[in-house]
Image (cartoon, rainbow, N blue to C red):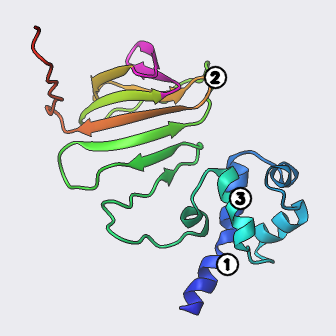
Amino acid sequence: MVENQDRTLDAVGPRLKHLRLRRDSTLHELAAETGISASTLSRLEAGLRRPTLEQLLPLARVHGVTLDELVGAPPTGDPRINLRPIATSDGSTVLPLTRRPGGIQAYKFVLPTGSDDRIPDLRTHEGYDWVFVLNGTLRLVLGEHNLILKAGEAAEFDTRTPHWFGATSAGPVEFLSLIGKQGERAHVRAAPKT
């Protein structure tokens, strides 16, 4: 048990450095945000000092992660309920909302502020996608169409059409994506007119 705890604490330093660099922040900027000196932060990242709870709490808050994510704690409980976000190299976060084989899969995406003139890397794959914007503005390039979707707006499309998602310079965007197999369609039920 102590050996596992030591390994967990030893892995915190590189994780802290990765989170700081992903935010494109300096040690001095992080020190100003957390109240922890830059030299202490440097020693924590290098693994020369073990973090205390008093240090981990502000670091988790500033980086926007839970304490479990910060220390890499193993999941507890039912894995169908305790879904973990996936951080990508471009700063995006993907949170799987379903974990069952087959059927429609649901995901929440959080994309960092983008560039309005970014050239999209269009992708295709089998399936059908339904997208709903929760917050922010989503740029959806769909074939030759360049669409701007705002909070509360939705789109659906065949994923064999070349497509790409991105945030605009207006800020980050959060959206839900439901991906189903080819031919699987959403069934919209509406109340009858009175």
Q: Of residues 24 and 126, which is closer to you in this image?
A: 24
Q: Of residues 123 and 140, which is closer to you in this image?
A: 140
- Whole-percent x, y for residue 81 in the image: 33, 59
What amino acid is at disc 3?
Answer: Leu
Image quadrant in which you'd find residue 4 = bottom right
Which residue, given by chain and number where applicable, does mark 3 sit on? 59
Which residue, given by chain and number where applicable, does mark 2 sit on? 169
Q: Is residue 114 left or right of residue 87?
A: right
Neighbour tally class for label 1: few under 14, some 14-19, many 20 plus, Cα within 10 Å: many
Point out the tag, 2 or 3, that comes first from the N-terminus. Answer: 3
Look at the picture and state if 164 lies above or below 104: above
- Whole-percent x, y for residue 118 in the image: 60, 24
Distance from disc 2 to disc 1, alpha carbons, whole Å, reads: 37 Å
Residue 142 is covered by the magenta coloring: yes
Residue 189 is covered by the magenta coloring: no
Residue drawn at (51%, 39%), measured in percent from left and top? 110
Which one is closest to the eye, mark 2 or mark 3? 3
Point out the tag, 2 or 1, that comes first from the N-terminus. Answer: 1
Can you name the residue that lies furthest to the top here?
A: 194
- Whole-percent x, y for residue 161 in the image: 31, 24
As helix, strand or loop, the secondary structure at mark 3 comes to helix
Magenta span of residues: 135-152
Distance from disc 2 to disc 3, alpha carbons, whole Å, reads: 26 Å
Residue 121 tag number: none
- Whole-percent x, y for residue 129 in the image: 29, 31
Point out the tag, 3 or 1, that comes first from the N-terminus. Answer: 1
Which residue, given by chain and number where applicable, does mark 1 sit on? 10
